[in-house]
Image (cartoon, rainbow, N blue to C red):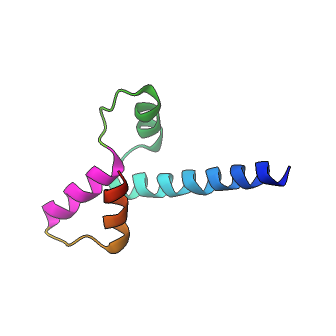
C-alpha cells in the first residue's frame, strides 16, 4: 500500500512541475498533455522550447535547464 502512495505522490510532483514549466513558457498545460498523449507532437517538447528560448534571448542555459535539455 505504501509503495502505491509513493508512486501517486511522485506522479503528483511531476505533474506540478510540468504545470509550472508550461505556465512559465506560456503554453497551455492541457493542450501540451493532449499533444503528448495523442502522439501528434505538434507542440515541441519542453526541453526544446526552453533551449530555443534561451538561444533567442542569448542567455546561457542554467545547469537545471541544461540537464532538462539533455534528457529530452
Query: What is the x, y in percent for residue 17?
Result: 51, 58
- Magenta-highlighted stretch: main secondary structure? helix
* Residue range corresponding to the magenta coloring: 45-57
Residue 62 falls inside the magenta stretch: no
Among the 4 quarters of the image, the one containing residue 70: bottom left
Residue 27 placement (x, y as % from top left)? 36, 46
Work out whether residue 19 or residue 44 is closer to the camera in this orientation and state it.
44
Q: Position of residue 13 (x, y in %)?
A: 60, 57
Residue drawn 56% across the image and 50% down it: 15
Please state if 14 lies on the left or on the right of 4 as rendered: left
Image-quadrant location for residue 52? bottom left
Q: Is residue 17 above or below residue 63?
A: above
**Number of residue marks:** 0
Measuring from the top left, give residue 66's x and y in whole percent.
31, 66
Relative to 34, residue 50 above or below: below
Residue plotted at (31% across, 38% down): 43
Let me know if residue 50 is in the magenta part.
Answer: yes
Q: Residue at x 47, y 58 (%)?
A: 20
Seen in the image, is 35 located left or right of residue 66? right
Residue farthest right in this picture: 1
Amino acid at each position: 500500500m505504501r509503495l502505491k502512495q509513493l508512486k501517486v505522490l511522485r506522479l503528483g510532483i511531476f505533474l506540478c512541475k510540468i504545470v509550472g514549466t508550461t505556465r512559465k513558457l506560456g503554453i497551455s498545460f492541457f493542450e501540451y498533455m493532449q499533444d503528448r498523449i495523442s502522439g501528434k507532437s505538434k507542440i515541441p517538447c519542453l526541453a526544446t522550447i526552453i533551449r530555443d528560448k534561451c538561444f533567442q534571448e542569448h542567455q546561457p542555459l542554467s545547469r537545471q535547464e541544461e540537464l532538462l535539455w539533455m534528457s529530452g
